[in-house]
Image (tube, grey):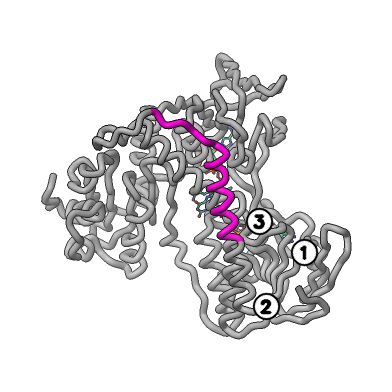
Amino acid sequence: MSSGMSYDLVVIGTGPGGYVCAIRAAQLGLKVAVVEKRKTFGGTCLNIGCIPSKALLYASEKFEEAAHELASFGVVVGKPTLDLPAMMKHKDDTVGANVNGVAYLFKKNKIDSFIGLGTITAPGKVQVKAEDGSTQDIETKNIVIATGSEVTPLPGVTIDEQVVVSSTGALALPAVPQNLVVVGAGVIGLELGSVWSRLGAKVTVVEFLDRILPGMDGEVAKQAQRIFEKQGFTFKLGHKVLGVEQSGGSAKVTIEPAAGGEKIVLEVDKVLVSIGRRPVTDGLGLDQVGVTLDRGRVVIDDHFATNVPGIYAIGDVVRGPMLAHKAEDEGIAVAEILAGQHGHVNYNVIPGVVYTSPEIAAVGQTEEDLKAKGITYNVGKFPFTANGRARAMRQTNGFVKILADAKTDQVLGVHIIGPVAGELIGEACVLMEFGGSAEDLARTCHAHPTLSEAVKEAALGVDKRSIHI
Ligand code: FAD
Ligand code: NAI
């Protein structure tokens, strides 16, 4: 660590937005420091978000495979037993390797790091308050706020991270709960609900709306719900939580239809609150320097600048989807702008992936979006049941759906539910980034036998000429 220094750029927060911004700025020759209040770098994503959740999703999928799937391939292993501490160690080791990787990259790129709460005391001035109360003042030409987000609380419900947990507690339960109520059928609820369901918990998801995964293509969400129900999930859609009463290590969750009606009491041993995330600006001193907020989010222009010269913001703390790759791309763009280049993010091509089994992935517009805008479109759809590789893997649930402009054939949205959908969506992103058409995709040679042939077949389907259905 260094002190009494003056920088070109100080980045507050080292999540995917902040650390990537710092590295890109250093690559471009800027003198950069980062400020982080956690003991480790990497933010929500690496410490308590994307990475630990994917480590547990992968491990629990292996358990599920051993319990229910391997025998159908002729691999007989007997009934698997769960070593939860070993699974948690795998998660912790994965997190450790990733956060240490960021520390290494900071050193490699000669980025100074300050551990403590960062407060902007004036444009160009950041004070860092360490855990022991000591403070250091740093001077800088520019500041990037990358302070991310935190769990949105459920009014009237206390998250104690023991019985009533947020995603953070749900990533570190000491034992598999018998019954788990998940509040919110969004990404966290379905991913972490899947982890504990696979390991043996009976999962009930309470969702205020009458559908799961709001914002995702409706047809995909419906199919996903059917699959999750087969996996053992119970959905209480169109229900709201009235209260959670805790006693002796368990909880009674009272719910009621959102439109009014009979109350139901669910007696469970754990409750996961996953109703969204909200931006973090506490302690940053934004009031004092006059940075404008809109419903808690830092307001920025198209070049990530706040209303105060020299102060920029990116990632979960600003508008747009709360996703790690969106934060990273904004980090790169603002670093390039600060170095005198023309950084840019194409918000029309930001993929979203739900890492359940099967995975759900989307980029661009949904059918609902296109209908609302009055854009005429053609649909190409191809089911994984008709894909040879998916059959060989016994993973035939789901389909690929491509939406292309009816007049120009330009691909406007791709929606996939199926095996490794999160990887398959990549080629759709590249296609859309280049403004490609369904015909471009349909005429591109895809290796056989691969799951990606389902993407090509869906593209052929836009012109009603799929070969295998
Ligand atoms: P963050 O990662 O939240 O980082 C902000 C950092 O700023 C934190 O380290 C915080 O300690 C620090 N900070 C805040 N205030 C101060 C201050 N005043 N001084 C110093 N430091 C400060 N996204 C995906 O794209 N894919 C996924 O699979 C995925 N899985 C997720 C799973 C879970 C359980 C959760 C909770 C989130 C997940 N996300 C996922 C979302 C993803 O984590 C966020 O979109 C991403 O972390 C946002 O990055 P960020 O840099 O904006 O902020
Ligand atoms: P979410 O926004 O995905 O889902 C929240 C759900 O809760 C919605 O369906 C909403 O209708 C419902 N809801 C809201 N208030 C409610 C209430 N009072 N009672 C019942 N239901 C209620 O939020 P989630 O799952 O908490 O995740 C937060 C964010 O983290 C995501 O939006 C995403 O940006 C990010 N994330 C991304 C992941 C990924 O990319 N794979 C994984 C996990 C999180």
Q: Secondary structure at mark 2?
A: strand
Q: Is residue 456 visible?
A: yes
The amino acid type, in three-letter code, at marker 3 is Arg
Mark 2 to mark 3: distance in Å?
A: 25 Å
Rendering coords of residue 337 (x, y %): 57, 79
469 and 90: which one is in front?
A: 90
| First of labels 2, 3 by sequence position | 2
- Is 302 displayed left or right of 164 in the figure? left
- Secondary element under disc 1, as helix, strand or loop, is strand
| The magenta stretch spans residue 95 | yes
Tag 1 residue:
118
Q: Write down the quadrant of residue 32 in the picture.
A: bottom right
Give above or below for 290 relative to 245: below
Q: Is mark 2 within 8 Å of ligand 1?
A: no
Give the residue at mark 2: 32
Residue position for label 3: 297
Query: Magenta span covers which residues?
Result: 79-99
Label 2 sits on what residue type? Val
Which numbered disc, 3 or 1, marks the residue closer to the eye?
A: 1
Quarter assignment of residue 223:
top left
Residue at the image point whose x is 46% and y is 39% from the top: 60
